[in-house]
Image: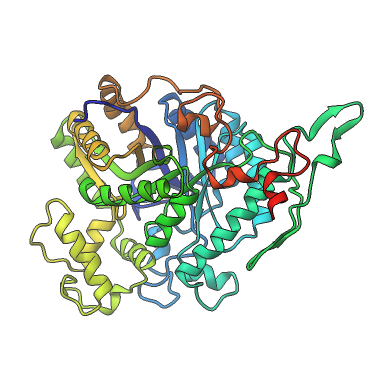
């Protein structure tokens, strides 16, 4: 293990749907995923995770159904499995969870492709106020054709074009959050709530957006919410290096993941940012029990509730490929479609226990049915803690997004078995770095660091006390 141990960041990776990355998990009698529409389900989980000192609950989200498998536009495999369908917007529950907690943060996924920057800025300012600065925005450009069709498009906007749109989108929201209200604009005295001379229009006119402003919300505790990003493509990693304060990554081995981590940090440094300021967390599923044998039995039980058709539906959405067009016994390591062949051969070479295995539809379904395409660790508490430490050290990770095979059971097991071991080893803090602080302070581990770092591109839009106009505006 590394000689210098850094305390790890730990998030719960969830979705407001009956199942997230383990389709069919809702049918497990011990699983409470089908309670996703009950606010008490989420407030109870938030309290449980805060007591265990999780940094945040990270809410994934999608804007369409997984309808490529056996398609086109076919949700029949998706709906029985509740494979991320039905699904609610997670943002509306944040205020309720914040009301019953004090320090845990809430990461919420929202798309730059299907929402105007003006309204998104308002929604996140609102929850940043109501949570006292404990909200993060997971920036996505969306990847499902079904979402594009439901927002009036014939097909998705081209991948790199979505990131170009996202780039301008970010500069619009920075102007709204950082440069529309001066730091001392809110007065609340002598009958004046705010000085109108210190609230300005941003007058953004760009290729994709024309937004006059001003921002309709007064400055919230963080102004700009803490910024997550999860893109793994070349364009996605470049976007993360420029804008993200935390990056969500995934992979089958820490050795392979290290390449992505190094790339993101190197690109950030080239842009003038402190590469260590970007917190990188990996998605992982942990199945743990008192002994390795019991953990394996628990894993096998979870598998028995998994819906393989739902897993293939998720695979279709993630990759864009419909595996129903292939024979049941076809080995996808050798199919003519190069993209599928590349994905499967990567898994064949890296997934533990699959050396030399034939990768048929069933193999792919089995691989995706628990935890999706993220790595899975099964074992007793020390074995799991060893592996998490190995991942953190080899891949240079700052922490983990823990997904679940059963909710809240997977998190209960982590809290009971794994977190105490990591704390004894010095890999988890006993208390929040900044109790009652903002999410940005919690992730940075420094009181008072509520705002974007000075080397972040959004910081250039600040309107500081004493300035006639923001410095950026005088340069345009």
Extreme residue toward the right, this view: 191
Asked whether, in this view, residue 244 is left or right of residue 314, the answer is right
User: Which x, y percent locates residue 242?
Assistant: 48, 51
User: Which x, y percent locates residue 78?
Assistant: 40, 64
In which quadrant will I find the C terminus?
Answer: bottom right
**From this viewpoint, is residue 17 visible?**
no
User: Which x, y percent locates residue 343?
Assistant: 25, 65
Q: Residue at x 37, y 61 (%)?
A: 233
Would you place residue 169 above or below residue 150 in this image?
above
User: Which x, y percent locates residue 282?
Assistant: 33, 44
Q: Closest to the observer: 35 or 389?
A: 389
Task: Count the labels in the image.
Answer: 0
Q: Residue at x 35, y 75 (%)?
A: 70
Would you place residue 55 above or below residue 164 in this image?
above
Res 130 quadrant in image: top right
Asked whether, in this view, residue 20 is left or right of residue 330, the answer is right
Res 385 quadrant in image: top left
In which quadrant will I find the N terminus?
Answer: top left
Q: Closest to the observer: 55 or 287?
A: 55
Q: Closest to the observer: 81 or 320?
A: 320
**From this viewpoint, is residue 465 visible?**
yes
Would you place residue 296 above or below residue 110 in this image?
above
Q: Residue at x 69, y 44 (%)?
A: 471
Extreme residue toward the left, this view: 356
């Amino acid at each position: 293990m590394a000689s210098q141990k850094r305390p790890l960041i730990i998030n719960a990776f969830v979705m407001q749907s009956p199942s997230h990355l383990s389709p069919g998990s809702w049918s497990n009698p011990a699983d409470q995923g089908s309670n996703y529409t009950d606010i008490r389900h989420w407030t109870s989980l938030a309290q449980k995770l805060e007591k265990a000192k999780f940094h945040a609950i990270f809410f994934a989200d999608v804007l369409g159904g997984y309808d490529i498998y056996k398609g086109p536009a076919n949700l029949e495999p998706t709906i029985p499995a509740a494979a991320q369908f039905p699904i609610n917007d997670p943002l509306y529950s944040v205020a309720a969870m914040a009301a019953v907690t004090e320090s845990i943060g809430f990461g919420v996924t929202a798309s730059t492709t299907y929402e105007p920057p003006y309204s998104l800025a308002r929604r996140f300012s609102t929850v940043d106020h109501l949570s006292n600065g404990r909200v993060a925005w997971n920036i996505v450009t969306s990847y499902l054709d079904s979402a594009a069709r439901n927002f009036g498009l014939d097909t998705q906007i081209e991948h790199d074009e979505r990131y170009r749109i996202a780039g301008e989108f970010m500069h619009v929201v920075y102007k709204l959050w950082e440069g529309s209200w001066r730091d001392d604009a809110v007065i609340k005295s002598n009958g004046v709530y705010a000085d109108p001379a210190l609230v300005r229009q941003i007058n953004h006119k760009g290729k994709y957006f024309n937004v006059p402003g001003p921002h309709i919300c007064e400055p919230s505790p963080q102004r700009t919410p803490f910024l997550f990003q999860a893109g793994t493509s070349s364009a996605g990693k470049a976007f993360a290096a420029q804008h993200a304060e935390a990056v969500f990554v995934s992979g089958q081995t820490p050795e392979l993941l290290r390449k992505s981590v190094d790339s993101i940090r190197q690109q950030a440094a080239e842009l003038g940012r402190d590469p260590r300021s970007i917190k990188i967390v990996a998605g992982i599923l942990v199945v743990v029990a008192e002994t390795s044998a019991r953990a394996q039995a628990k894993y096998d039980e979870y598998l028995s509730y998994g819906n393989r058709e739902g897993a293939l539906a998720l695979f279709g959405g993630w990759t864009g490929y419909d595996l129903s067009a292939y024979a049941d016994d076809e080995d996808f390591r050798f199919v003519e479609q190069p993209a599928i062949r590349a994905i499967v051969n990567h898994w064949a070479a890296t997934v533990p226990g699959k050396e030399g295995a034939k990768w048929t539809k069933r193999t792919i379904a089995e691989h995706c049915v628990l935890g999706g395409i993220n790595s899975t660790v099964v074992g007793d508490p020390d074995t799991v803690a060893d592996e998490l430490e190995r991942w953190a050290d080899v891949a240079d990770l700052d922490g983990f997004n823990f997904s679940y095979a059963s909710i809240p059971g997977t998190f209960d097991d982590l809290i009971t078995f794994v977190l105490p071991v990591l704390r004894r080893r010095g890999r988890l803090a006993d208390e929040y770095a900044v109790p009652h602080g903002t999410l940005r302070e919690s992730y940075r581990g420094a009181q008072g660091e509520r705002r974007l770092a000075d080397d972040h591109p959004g910081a250039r839009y600040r309107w500081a006390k004493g300035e006639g106009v923001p410095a950026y505006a005088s340069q345009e």
